[in-house]
Amino acid sequence: MKNSFNYRVIKNLDKMSCEQIKDIFTKDQGKINFLNSVLYAVQEAIMVLDTAGKIKFMNHSCEKLVNGSFSKLENKSIYKCDIDKVLYNIIKKVIGKQEKIVQQELYLQKPIEAFYNFNAFELLEDGSLCGYVCLIVDVTENINNALKKKQEDSIQSLSGLTAGLAHEIKNPLGSLDLHLQLVNRFIKNKRMEDKEELSELTKVIGDEIKRLHFIVNDFLFSLRPVKPQLKPDNINLVLQEACALLRPEIENSDIILEEEYSGKVPVVDLDKNYIKNAVINLIKNAAAAVKVRDDANERLVKVVTKIKDEKLLLLIRDNGIGMNKETVNKIFEPYFTTKEKGTGLGLTVVYKIIKEHNGEIIISSEPDKGTEFRIEFPLAEKHFKLLDIKKK
C-alpha cells in the first residue's frame, strides 16, 4: 500500500530542520500508536488484509481466532493460519470477489464453538482497491438470550392458548352434560314416544360436538408451524377463486361483494392454499361486520389489489360496524373475539400466514365507518451493498 504520510514528509525534507522532522515523526507516531492501542484492545475482532489475503493488521480478539500473534503473522497469508474452515471459506469468497458480504452469521468451532457476525468492507486508496477490513463480532450471548426469550415467550403463549382453550371448551361441555342428563331421563322414564323432543335434545348434542371439533381444530392449526410451499402464482386469480366460493353465501345476506384487481400485478411466490384460507377468513369477518349493521344504505365488502412503493397491496374493505382502537390492538391475540360463537383463533392464523409470506398486515378502522385490512407483500428482496472505506 502506498504510504501517503512518508511521501509527504520525504518531499519536504530539504525545507525542514532536523528538529522539525523529529517533531513531525514523534507527533504522528504517537497518534498511530494510540490508534493501534485502541483497535488492539476492542472486544470485536478486527483484521485488515491486502488483496492477496496477507495480514496487515490484527487486534487481540482476532489473534484468538487465528491462533497466533500479529507480530508473528504480519504479512503472512491468512490461508496459512490455523483458522476455522467456515471462516477460511468466507474470507476466500470475499477476497476472490465471488461474494460481497456486508453481514453474515457464522458458526465457528475453533477456537471454541460460538456464533459470530462477519462483516467485510472494501478498503480503497486513491479510488483503487487495496485491501479489506473484516469485523468479526461474537454474538453467542445475544443469540442464547434471544433463544431463551423465545422459549419463555413460547411457554407463556402456550399457557395463554391452553387457558383460552379450556375456557372455550367449558361451555359446550357443560351443554353436552346437561342434554345427556335429559336424554338419560327420557330413557329412564321410558318417554321414547316423544320423539320430537328427544330429537331436539340429540340435535343440540350433535351441534355442540361439532363446535368442540371446530374449536380443537382451530387450536391445533394455531399451534402448528405454518410452512408455506411458495410457488410463482397470480394473486388476482387466487382472490377470484376465494370470492367465487363465498359470493353465494355473502349475496344471500344482501351484501355486495366487489372485486377490483390491478392489471399490473406481477407473478409472486406464494402458497395458494394458505393465502386463499387467509383471504376467506378476512372476507367472512368483513361480511359479519357488515351483516349486523342495519343503518347502511348499501352493505359492501370490497377486495382490491394494487402496486405501490414496490409493494403488492391486498385490501379488504367493508362498511360494517367498525372497531375501536382497543379492539384493533387486540384483534390478532389468540382467543380474542367479538363474535358470540367465534373461537378467536381465525385472525391469529391469518397473521401467521401473512408473516410467513414476509408480508405485513395493517388494520384501519373506525366505529360505524367500517374496516380495512391492508396486506403488504414485498415485490423484490432488497440486498445490502458493501460500505467503502476510503483512505485519504
Image: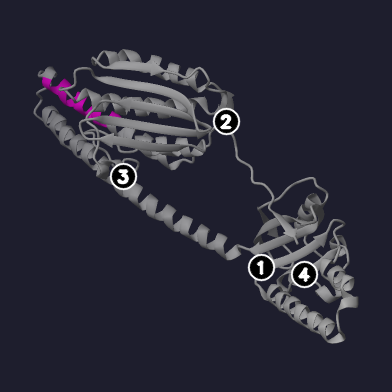
Look at discs 4 and 3 and give the one toward the viewer: 4
Residue 295 counted in the magenta span: no
What's the residue at 91%, 77% (across, down)? 14
- State whether the magenta stretch is mostly helix, strand or loop: helix
Q: Nearest the camera: 155 or 54? A: 54
Tell me the number on the disc at residue 329. 3
Q: Which quadrant holds residue 348?
A: top left
SS category of the residue bearing label 1: loop
Which of the numbered marks, if any, corresponds to residue 230?
A: 2
CA gap, disc 4 to disc 2? Answer: 44 Å
Q: CA distance from mark 3 to mark 1?
A: 40 Å
| Quadrant holding the N terminus | bottom right
Q: Which residue is mark 4?
A: 58
Q: Earlier in the sequence, mark 3 or mark 1?
A: 1
Q: Which mark is residue 44?
A: 1
x, y percent for residue 309: 50, 33
Q: Amino acid at mark 1?
A: Glu
Task: State the SS at label 2.
Answer: loop
Kindly tell me whether residue 85 is visible in this rendering: no
Whether residue 207 appears in magenta in the rendering, the answer is yes
Taking depth in this image into account, of 225 and 296 the one nearest to the observer is: 296
State which tag comes first along the sequence, 4 or 2: 4
Q: Which residues are magenta?
A: 197-210
Element marked by disc 3: helix
In the rendered structure, the answer to whether residue 145 lies left or right of residue 40 reads left
Mark 4 belongs to which amino acid? Answer: Met
Q: Are marks 1 and 4 in contact (CB under 8 Å)?
A: no
